[in-house]
Amino acid sequence: MAAAEREALAPFERADGGVNPYTVQLELQDCMQELVGIIRTEDELKQALERIAVLKERVATVGVEGHRQYNPGWHLALDLRSLLAVSECVALAALERRESRGGHTRDDYPKPDPELGKVKVVVRGKDGEVTVSQEPLDEMPDDLRALFEEKPRS
């Protein structure tokens, strides 16, 4: 508990020389919008992962001013690790999925891959590292499958 408290309060100790958390958030937002947007390529996704890795290092230098009672900058500083983790997971999953299907479009893989249509991409944290795997899709329940079956028109 004491370690979590020290970690949470650390940005106040770097108030004078720390990186502004809003700067890191803006850089992450730009990275995701430019490189992990609606239409993606392998090169862009790899660039995004490199930029995310740099931002993850910068989070350790974030500083905030003010008080603990109400401090949006501090709240953002605390949220940045989660924002970066989710961004990394999205980019890794998109890199793994070498196809275009539904809302996922890869400019370098413009067609669906029938084999990837049978699996889900699973991203997990393990031993401080993020792993990506493909696992078989769960079987669709009969009541849900019935909604997707084409019905004859009258």
Image (spheres, grey):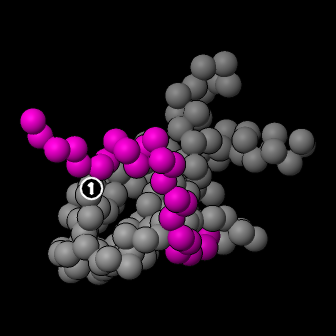
Vertically, is 48 above or below 148?
Answer: below
Q: Position of residue 56 (x, y in %)?
A: 55, 62
View extreme (left): residue: 154
Which residue is pictured at 89% across the width and 42% down the height?
Answer: 1
Q: Position of residue 86 (x, y in %)?
A: 51, 54
Q: Nearer the viewer, residue 87 or 27?
A: 87
Q: Nearer the viewer, residue 59 or 149?
A: 149
Residue 18 in sight: no
Q: Quadrant of the C terminus?
A: top left
Q: Is residue 151 magenta?
A: yes
Task: Check disc 1 and give the amino acid type.
Answer: Gly
View extreme (top): residue: 69
What is the tally of numbered marks visible in this picture?
1
Within the image, what quadrant is residue 128 found in? bottom right
**Secondary-structure class at tag 1:** loop
Within the image, what quadrant is residue 39 found in? bottom left
Q: Position of residue 6 (x, y in %)?
A: 81, 44
Which residue is pictured at 21% across the width and 80% down the height?
Answer: 108
User: In the displayed structure, does residue 131 sit left or right of residue 101?
Assistant: right
Q: Which residue does the numbered mark 1 point to in the structure image?
A: 103
Which residue is pictured at 60% across the width and 73% down the height?
Answer: 131
Q: Report the span colored magenta.
A: 130-154
Q: Position of residue 38 (x, y in %)?
A: 23, 58
Label 1 crowd bin: few (<14), some (14–19), many (20+), radius 10 Å:
few
Vertically, is 27 above or below 116?
Answer: above
